[in-house]
Image (cartoon, rainbow, N blue to C red):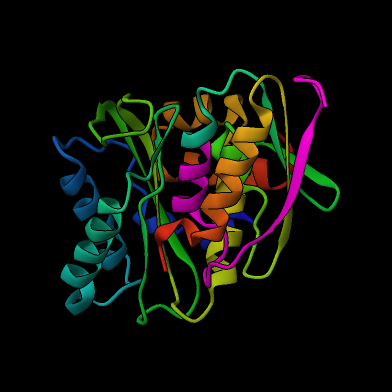
């Protein structure tokens, strides 16, 4: 796979209170300096992971499956980092 | 969900003049108290809970906007107020800028979906630059409510 190919992975929201402002901030913070693009998709809705405002519009409660998509140099690493945040439950609960 | 359904008109502050994040939060909670939407004996506890939430990470989410919030069992449904600070408030925002528009939310602990819907509603409208600009220029609570109804009805 070339550096420009999109990478994607499904993750589940395991936070009891859903994807609220703290996790959204941590996602935006993680991807802020990534030069490529990162989208988070919930069914038909895809939002820019660099924007907290966009992330909050996902309105994703506990159990929601989201798809992380990234492209650009280092996309695989950014997906890994984001998936790890979800797996660690954002270290919140 | 519509902004005008959960923002309490009588608690809106259009000329907030404070020198700290805590003072801003205290004024907004106090305003909800004066408007009769939270009981006076819960005021201190709610302020403390919101400040504790801020320790997890500032709710100053950039572009001059903050959304301080907490859950509290004394409310049966989502309640919110808005404060506008012409001179800005230092909020330790993620982008390092002062905050000029604050939405303070209190939601019932057993209804996390309501909280997410409230945040979604607020952030969706705050992406609209015209809305933010007009909001910052609002002089009275009635002006703010009219503006909320305009964005709720997609007239802005």
Magenta span has A12?
yes
Q: Report the residue at 60% width, 17% height from top.
A: A35
- Does residue B60 sit above or below B29 in this rendering? above
Residue A16 in the image: above or below residue B105: below
Give the vertical position of A39 relative to A61 (above or below).
above
Seen from the viewer's position, the closer of residues B91 and A77 is A77
Most foreground residue, A43 or B49: A43
Queried whether the magenta region covers residue B60, the answer comes back as no
**For residue B14, what is the image quadrant?**
top left
**Viewport quadrant of the N terminus of chain A:** top right
Task: State the extent of the magenta-drawn residues as a range.
Answer: A1-28
Residue B147 shows in this picture: no
Q: Vertically, is B138 above or below A67?
A: above
Question: Going 46% across and 43% down the picture, which residue do you hit?
Answer: A25
Instruction: Give the residue displayed 54% in from the left and 77% down from the top.
Output: B111
Q: Residue A36 or B132: which is nearer the viewer? A: A36
Farthest residue in the front direction? A1
Residue A53 left/right relative to B103: right
Asked whether residue A39 appears in the rendered view, the answer is yes
């Amino acid at each position: 796979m070339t550096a420009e190919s999109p990478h994607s992975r499904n993750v589940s929201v395991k936070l009891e209170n859903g994807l609220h402002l703290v996790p959204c901030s941590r996602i935006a913070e993680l991807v802020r300096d990534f030069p490529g693009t990162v989208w988070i998709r919930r069914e038909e809705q895809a939002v820019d992971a660099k924007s907290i405002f966009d992330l909050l519009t996902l309105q994703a409660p506990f159990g929601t499956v989201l798809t992380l998509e990234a492209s650009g140099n280092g996309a695989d690493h950014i997906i890994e980092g984001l998936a790890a945040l979800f797996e660690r439950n954002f270290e919140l609960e | 969900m519509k902004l005008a359904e959960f923002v309490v008109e009588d608690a809106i502050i259009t000329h907030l003049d404070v020198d700290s994040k805590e003072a801003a939060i205290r004024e907004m909670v106090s305003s909800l108290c004066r408007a009769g939407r939270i009981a006076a004996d819960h005021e201190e506890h709610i302020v403390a809970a919101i400040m504790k939430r801020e320790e997890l990470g500032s709710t100053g989410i950039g572009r001059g906007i903050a959304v301080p919030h907490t859950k509290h069992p004394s409310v049966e449904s989502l309640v919110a107020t808005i404060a506008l600070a012409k001179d800005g408030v230092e909020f330790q925002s993620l982008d390092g800028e002062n905050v000029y528009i604050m939405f303070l939310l209190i939601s019932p602990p057993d209804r996390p979906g309501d909280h997410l819907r409230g945040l979604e509603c607020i952030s969706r409208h705050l992406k609209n630059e015209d809305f933010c600009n007009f909001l910052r220029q609002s002089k009275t609570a009635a002006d703010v409510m009219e503006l909320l109804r305009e964005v709720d009805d997609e007239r802005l």
